Image (cartoon, coloured by chain):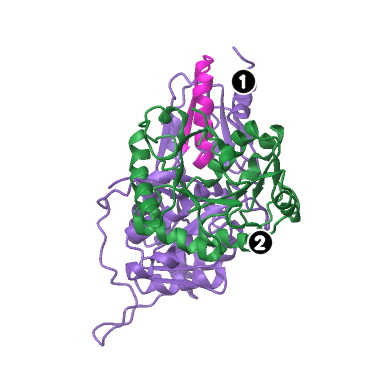
Chain colours: A green, B purple
Amino acid sequence: MTLDLKKDKRIRIIIGHYGSGKTEFAVNYALALKKEMPKVALCDLDIVNPYFRSREKASLLETDGITVISGAFGHQTNLDLPMLSPSILAPLQDDESQVILDVGGDAVGARVLARYTAYFKPGEYDMFCVINAYREQTQDLMGVISHIKNIEDTVGVKVTGLINNTHLLRETSAEDVMKGQALAVEVSKKLNIPIRYVSTLEKVTHQLPSDIEGDVFAIKMIMREDWM
Amino acid sequence: MAKVLMKGNEAIGAAAIKAGCKYFFGYPITPQNELPEYMSREMPKAGGVFLQAESEVAAINMVYGAAGAGARVMTSSSSPGIALKQEGITYIAGAELPCVIVNIVRGGPGLGGIQPAQSDYNQVTRGGGNGDYKLLVYAPANLQEMVDLMQEAFDAADFYRNPVMMVGDGMIGQMMEPIEFKDSVSRFELPEKDWATTGTKGQRKPNIINSLALDPAELEKHNHKLQKKYDAMKENEVRYETYNMENAEVVIVAYGTTSRIVRNAINDLKAQNINVGLIRPITLWPFPEKAFDEVPAACKSLLSVEMSMGQMVDDIKIASNGRWPVSFYGRAGGMIPTPEAVMEKVKELIGGAK
């Protein structure tokens, strides 16, 4: 399987319902993108929830040469404050930088993006909505659409791609992914937004049909410790 | 019913509503905020009431009031917030009222931090409030178990007319897991709440909800009555799980998230020919003393593994009654033990690797 992440716009915004797997996707995407491009920055914009954020894996990402930007006082500061680092502007303003914005869950988490909308010019950004059909509020068409609309209204820019990341953690089967795919196809048709990726565990990718809509993206569970 | 992926805090809310909880009073604190958030959204749909109180003290006293009126009621908080609720909790225990209190534990002491910990062991098992009272304390290790125990928690609270505490470390509140909501049948036969203050309608004497008794003889009698209830809980409500106890050289005692880390360590040690058992208390009070009868006589040591500084060690010593030495390994302040560190500690106890 070959991915071509260069096809995506320089600024990639990852949004979705919390628990959809945004952060897991963002971290895996950053590592894959670094293999294709020299300068990659991952900005952890999650100021809603102090658990399971991409900054927890900062050292792993930094070892790979990825720039990780999180709170103004560094990755380890567990202040329960809505605090952003001014350094986020650096990769956004640097045309050489590939940027991934890992955003907090729901419209509440996405609100922070509104501060950066000046950088999200049509054709120069991608905003990917991560969908997990096993999450309580995004199990059906109306649920997903309402999530997308709420987030779009909050941020002020449009979603450009869907990511079917339907999963039940390690229990995920190809059947689960296809259940989510059916939903993603429905959303895609209704909103006229393409399915950009189908992301799932490596072992499951081999069981998916070859004509599935969207590029298949094999992910590793990086955020979840082995004992969990 | 099909599985859904839920966050611990949301799952607690969903399970409570399913168990018939109609009132939720709370005050925000990390890492349990998704629970009141969920309740604020879902409780009205279930015909119940969500109210964000002005403080933890106010919230627990609202629980006191609703419980006195016979309602199924719940509150939730995290460690320092639970400390604030202690006055209300002892009043509720004294007045013999049922309620469920959720504690998603974070590091302490004081305001501490917001990362997971188990350092409320003493707070939840030793009271915290004044007087001779006990809480029935559940400490599930995964979200499915927590959801399954929620019905039990409300039923036991009603049956014993006593507050019940559901304890999860921050990890349990924050982690996502697939959950199935099963229909369960209550194992309790629950009597009418004829003691509740629901209005006399001129037909009976007023019911009185109170924890003040100025006559010492009366208060002593009340204490004996409470004690009888706690004895019945000790007899009937102990829950635990044991794992890999046969020929165990070391038996680890661990609950909640920590027990999962330990289980991984046990499996890895097994591959290295080192046999280690696990006692996992599901009720922290009553503590599963009987479980220690399963420990092999030749066991070299018991080992308490905690996300606290050895708070469970005393209970292990009492339960094991000098039969084996008791050791401790723990992390604190929001740090999580690794399976590797647990394995190291076990090897140290048995005198090196094999």
Can see residue A204? yes
Residue placed at 40% from the left, 56% from the top? Answer: A191
**For this rendering, which residue is in front, B242 or A66?**
A66
Question: In the rendered image, which quarter is residue A48 located in?
Answer: bottom right
Secondary structure that dominates the magenta span: helix
**How many numbered discs sit on the rendered protein?**
2
Name which residue type carries label 1: Lys
The verdict on residue A49 being magenta is no
The region drawn magenta spans B255-280
Q: Is residue A148 left or right of residue A26?
A: left
Q: In the image, is residue A62 above or below residue A162?
A: above
Q: Residues within 10 Å of mark 1 (few under 14, many from 20)?
A: some
Tag 2: amino acid: Ala
Residue with the mark numbered 1: B347
Please name whichever residue, B338 or B252, is drawn nearer the observer in this view of the structure: B338
Residue B43 position in % (x across, y down): 38, 67
Indicate left or right for B115 with B45 as reference. Answer: right
- Mark 2 = which residue? A118
Q: Quadrant of residue A165?
A: top left
Q: Is residue A86 left or right of residue A144?
A: right
Regarding residue B222, the answer to whether it shows in the image is no
